[in-house]
Image (cartoon, rainbow, N blue to C red):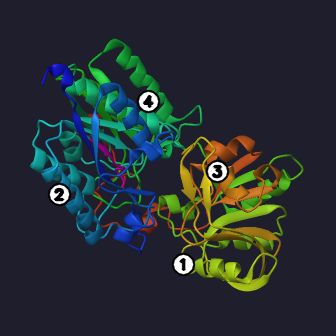
Amino acid sequence: MSSTDFKPRIFVCGIATETHGFNKYPTTLEAFTEKGLFFVPEHGDLQQFRDSDHYFAGYLDVAEVEGWELVVGVCAFAWPAGPVSEHAFESLWARIEKQLLTEGPFDGLLLPLHGGMACEHLDDPEGEFVRRIRQRLGRDVPLAVNLDPHANLSPQFVRDCDIICGFHTTPHTDIRAASLRSATLLARTLKGEIKPHCCSIHPPMITGLDHGRTLAEASPMRSLLERVRQLQADDPQLLDASFMASFPHADQTWTGPSAVLVMDGESDRADAYLNELGEEIWRTRDVLTIDIVSIDEALDAVEATAAQPRPFLLGDFSDCPYAGGYGDSTAMLQALIARRVAGAVFGPLFDKAAVEQAHAAGVGAEIEVALGGKCDPRFGGGPVSGIAAVRALSDGKFVHSGPYLQGQAGDLGKSALLNIEGVDVIVNSFPSQIHDREQLKLFGVIAEEMNVIVSKAFNHMRADLQPISRGLLYPDAGGIFSFNFQQFHWQKIRRPIWPLDDVEIDVAEMDRS
């Protein structure tokens, strides 16, 4: 076979989720394979993601240009919840390991991960995942990894990867672009153009970088990415950079933000870059570009601006299921009812029993309900009882039209729109969030016509809903995704660490890979 006939074989696999270490419900195998964000089995078809803002779209873009054969292993993503069970992780790994050992050799690997996973039996699951791959394939097969910026990275994980490319936006609107970056660097590696390796710095912080937000001018992430572009203009060895804001509630040894560089070969500049970037992450640790307020302050603002056009957007962030919240806290709903706020839609509220009641009764019926507040009433309140009118029913299927996950199929699950005491409440059958106008349209709700939209969301709703809103606030309604870190019983996190402890540190003392 001539060299022009060579067709690189690239293996694609991953196990990923974002874990709330204090959520009492473990992430099971079913959460990945039946109820996950997506699950692609061995030999699955990646083409279903071809025209969407998805990891696999970027991989396919490069594979077509380079003539790669993409060999698909298990790619499993679960919705955020509690620590991943040992059975779930090891079952998925066993399937991936079998294919690694029986269907090779492979010339390179593409790993769509997240970086925020925690397991019952592993302190560094992503690090263990990559370590096991290295054990089986050796150091000569290059590994290119994609990560969410809400990742907690160990120095060992960074050392074991050749290429790491995180998203550069929050809300995440560059997923395809990030996978294009990693796959392009892998292609250059296979052609012998570069010899990438990763290095990182890890300031002693639980969270940072304004949780990764990039919409505001004052965003630390935006400033750091601009600084990297300046550095790259003068240094071709600096191939890529990513900034991880952390998933702060994971409770792992390496929970916390980091900066990761991909360098071409050995560089005497890399350490200086890490010092500068690590120092900036530490300096901006108090920066917050959103307004976290009390429930009453939020509703005061809604009422004060009610005569203005467009809806007011409220993020019930402390119960955000995309951050491992239970999705059924009711404090915010109770306040909307008590204040008799007109033109309000709230949700989605996780309550499978109420969904079944509504579907059994049908549109137009009135049902007696006890809404939400069942998972752990200590965090955000117990059930809201009363008579609710069934306004609409849905199977929850939609396609994202907004910038976040654009073109991807979405699913709220079996769901319903109820009206209780004048407030429209979307109830659904698993924890989720509202971040796209298409989700509201499922129930005949036109976002632009509402007075207030309350979503159990933190960041991603901003991509589609903030541009049509008259205001945005984040009321703290007491859920488990609270930034009052002192209330949690930390067991694994390294200490001392900000803001749990008084920390003074020189950049030279910061951990690094």
Instruction: For marks 2 and 4, give the CA distance.
Output: 41 Å
Local crowd at mark 4 within 10 Å, few (<14), some, or many (≥20)?
many
Instruction: Name the image quarter holding residue 332.
Output: bottom right
Mark earlier in primary sequence (3, 1): 1
* Viewer-side label of 3, 4: 3
Say which amino acid is labelled 1: Arg
Q: Tell me where the magenta segment starts and ends, as one range.
A: 110-116
Tell me the SS state at disc 1.
loop
Say which amino acid is labelled 2: Lys
Local crowd at mark 3 within 10 Å, few (<14), some, or many (≥20)?
many
Residue at figure coordinates x 83%, y 71% from the top left = 422
Q: Which residue is mark 3?
A: 436
Q: Give the x, y percent position of residue 363.
A: 78, 75
Left-right relation of 435 to 338? left
Check if residue 20 falls in the magenta segment.
Answer: no
Contact between marks 2 and 4 (CB within 8 A): the answer is: no
Residue at figure coordinates x 25%, y 70% from the top left = 86
Mark earlier in primary sequence (2, 4): 2
Q: Nearer the viewer, residue 387 or 192?
A: 192
Left-right relation of 83 to 457? left
Tell me the SS state at disc 2.
helix
User: Which label belongs to residue 98?
Assistant: 2
Q: Which residue is mark 4?
A: 224
Instruction: For marks 2 and 1, give the CA distance.
Output: 44 Å
Is residue 281 placed above or below 298 in the rendered structure? above
Say which amino acid is labelled 3: Asp
Instruction: For marks 3 and 2, give the CA distance.
Output: 39 Å
Q: Which residue is mark 1?
A: 378
Q: Give the x, y percent position of residue 202.
A: 30, 42
Quadrant placement of the N terminus: top left
